[in-house]
Amino acid sequence: MIATLLQALFWLSVAGAWYAYFGYPLALAVITRIRGAGVGGGAGQTDRAPTVSLIIPVHNEREVIEDKLANTRSLAYPVGRMEVLFVADGCSDGTAEYLRERQDEIVRVIEIHQRGGKAGALNAGLAEARNEIVVFSDASIQLEPGALEALVRPFLDPQVGCASGEDHIAQMGGEGLYGRYELWLRRLESQLHSIVGASGSFYAQRRPLCEPFAPGLAPDFLSVLRTVERGYRAVAVADARGTMRATVSHRDEFDRKVRTVLRGMTTLREYAHLMNPFAHGWFAFALVSHKLMRWMVPVFLVTALLASALLAPASPTYLGLLILQGAFYALAGGTALPYPPLARSLPVRVSAYFTTVTMATMSAWAKFLAGTRQEIWSPTRR
């Protein structure tokens, strides 16, 4: 009886993890092949480019701010229809001074002298934003010249309330592969109805839909949820491309992921009603599958590992499955070995990244259940 229960737990856990990473994308691919709303583009509705307010929150970004400012000025957009608002949130490294000296009719700097966190910085930018479309970006991403024009194009469709660009990781490896996987999922979700999360480094929203951001919630996720709640679609824009470098270390990625998942969990709790399929249809299906099921993967993996360990002494099959699981996690340790060819190999980097993300999600669950919330943000070093 106990063995049967453990076997059921093992295979249910495996099925849950498989669905989160493979079953859901497969279901999306099949469903969107049958039906899909498409991104929309408003072709022929108007030739007028909407006015844009680009908000870029920064905290101690002196190392990259020169490149970000130059990149922002290089964006192709009709003259007189764009303003850029850099929000310096408690900067102490000269970032605010550098920007202040380079203000002009397009670029303005909003200085917050006492650090208040990302929500506060974004709200300060929103208070000054005057234009029809608000675009949010980070200092860490370098945008292609036509990225801004591409990002706002879907807003010619009146049903589109939010649009996400694509942030590509320059290096191949665990984070780069995972990033490409996430972008592919967003394109499929966009065809079905709406994406469930935007790229925090580059996305846009109609100004009337922009409400003040709440501390402790993920702004990019929150913007999508509010958009859909108001009856609009949130879409992915493949041509709105930017490039980022991978995180410097697994520790940096771990910390970033804990922060991201914790804020995502907190946000989803506030908007749990959007997971009701009777009220929100395909979006509820995507939200549960992409977010909740993904965050449950560590629970599935730990359950599968423990169940196979308990079954292994009496079953060669489960002993073999236990060994396979152990071997995959052991690969992650290859990054710590003094043998660069092994540390740089794709299997080791994929295992290391997956293990880092899994452990970070477990840590986020512990913090979430303990009532911990996080708002003060430090830019991830890339």
Image (tube, rainbow, N blue to C red):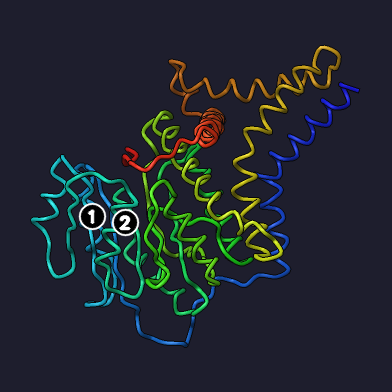
Quadrant placement of the N terminus: top right
Disc 2 versus disc 1: distance between alpha carbons?
8 Å
Residue at point 57%, 64% (across, down): 194
Q: Residue furthest right?
A: 1
Residue designated by label 2? 122
User: Would you say 134 lies left or right of 234 here?
Assistant: left
**At 44% across and 65% down in the image, what residue appears?**
239
Quadrant of the frame with the C terminus:
top left
Residue 190 visible in the shown view: yes
Indicate the position of residue 12 as horizontal and vertical percent values. Answer: 78, 36
Q: Please name the residue shown 54% across and 24% down the image.
A: 332
Q: Amino acid at mark 2?
A: Leu
Q: Which residue shows up at 44% across the image and 75% down it?
A: 155
In the displayed structure, would residue 213 be above or below residue 279? above
- Residue 177, image x, y percentages: 52, 43
Q: Is residue 265 left or right of residue 61?
A: right
Tell me the kind of residue under disc 1: Val
Q: Residue 349: x, y in percent? A: 51, 31
Q: Is residue 2 above or below residue 68?
A: above
Q: Are marks 2 and 1 in contact (CB under 8 Å)?
A: yes
Query: Which quadrant of the figure has residue 109?
Result: bottom left
Please state the horizontal and vertical placement of residue 186, each as a whole percent of the image.
55, 57
Viewer-proximal residue, 145 or 250?
250
Tell me if I can see residue 350 in this picture.
no
The residue beneath circle 1 is: 87
Secondary structure state at the residue bearing disc 2 = helix
| The one of 342 and 230 positioned closer to us in this rendering | 230
Asked if residue 299 lies left or right of residue 258, the reply is right
Q: Residue furthest left?
A: 101
- Asked if 186 appears above or below 83 in the picture, the reply is above
The numbered mark, 2 or 1, whose residue comes first in the sequence reads 1
Label 1 crowd (10 A; few <14 / some 14-19 / many >=20): many
